[in-house]
Image (tube, grey):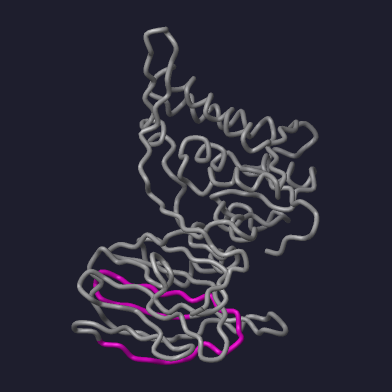
Amino acid sequence: MALGVSIPRILLDSNVLLIGALSPLSNASELRKLTPQARFIVTSSIVEESRRVIARDSSNRMVTAAANDRLDAFLHDMQALVLPTQGTDTRGHDDHVSSPANLYQCDFICTYNVRDFENHGIEALPPLAIHFDFPGTAIEYPILGEDGTLLVGTRYYGNRTMGRILRAKNGTEVRSCSPGRIEVVGPDVGCQLYGQIPEGYAATFVFRYKKNGHFEAAAWVSDPVTGDSSGKLLLAQGTACFEPPVRPLMFFGQNYGFAGELFGVSGIPQYVRDGRMRPVLASGTLEVVEKSEDISALLADIDVLIDPAGFSVIVLNVQDRRTRTAAPPNRSRSDG
């Protein structure tokens, strides 16, 4: 998406509200850093729906009260404008979100359920995709496992490459063997090279592998002048063992030779098939194929303690599921 000069208006779905409030390390919670650059909007029905979910999934009243306090604090930190639901069409399953988004002239809906809003007349994006369109924000550290999919939005010029891309515990490594070309090297690797990303083209590079040994490197490229997509370009394919932990290299921790323009990075521990790539390509992040975090599990992480004075103290047993690293303001990396 492209953001204009005016401050964008973004309507938050209830799943984003709940995860932002209850999971401080989530991409949804990180949205609060964008409040100077964006106007966040919710409706009274979306807030009420969030409170109903909290009441339904909480183990007791104290947890319910604590979670509602977290929700109120998140709304305050987001400087969210809570608008009435009346006057909007709420007959459909998701109309209570899309209808007010259109009525209040929002630019985007922020939701983990992107597919639910494909035909509602307004662009829906997950939290990480919102982050990608604000300069100076964060890039998600890819989390990979026995299966994995890594996505890198990039463009390169001249002799620049992505360098060393990722490496498994057993030494299997994905790297650029020359500008626009990808290879996999390591023990017992069978790798067939195919196409090459054209110089100057914006490309969504995707590397996918399965625990049965199959891997594929491909890119979806766009013409630098017209912006038209030329579809999937197969770069490499073969068999290899990717023994966990599988770690991204590129520029995480140090510079592993990545040199080019960077639009975004994400990775998840599952093999994402072509049939699920359309919303991924539209949003620029794999977050759209991940299910949002289990609200009942997040609520189970809340402990409510009573101090000697009789006041309740909320303790969040937060698990650091995601590690984030700052992206440069111009979203580019170079050897220099």
The reply to whether the magenta stretch includes residue 199 is: yes
* Residue at 42% in and 92% down: 194
Give the residues in magenta. Answer: 190-218
The reply to whether the magenta stretch includes residue 5 is: no
How many numbered markers are drawn? Answer: 0
Instruction: Out of 136 and 276, give the one closest to the viewer.
Output: 136
* Residue at 49% in and 28% down: 54
Could you say where residue 94 lies in the image, as x and y percent from the top left? 63, 44
Residue positioned most to the top: 309
When asked about the image quadrant of residue 223, the answer is: bottom right
In the rendered view, does 321 fall on the left or right side of 190?
right
Could you say where residue 29 lies in the image, as x and y percent from the top left? 53, 43
Residue positioned most to the front: 336
Determine whether 39 is above or below 268 in the image. Answer: above
In the rendered view, does 94 fall on the left or right side of 303?
right
Determine whether 214 is above or below 82 in the image. Answer: below
When asked about the image quadrant of residue 250, the answer is: bottom left
Q: Quadrant of the N terminus?
A: bottom right
Determine whether 83 is above or below 226 in the image. Answer: above
Instruction: Out of 20 and 324, give the one closest to the viewer.
Output: 324
Instruction: Out of 142 and 103, give the one closest to the viewer.
Output: 142
Could you say where residue 84 lies in the image, as x and y percent from the top left? 75, 31
Could you say where residue 140 lies in the image, as x and y percent from the top left? 47, 58
* Residue at 51% in and 49% down: 27
Determine whether 70 is above or below 283 in the image. Answer: above
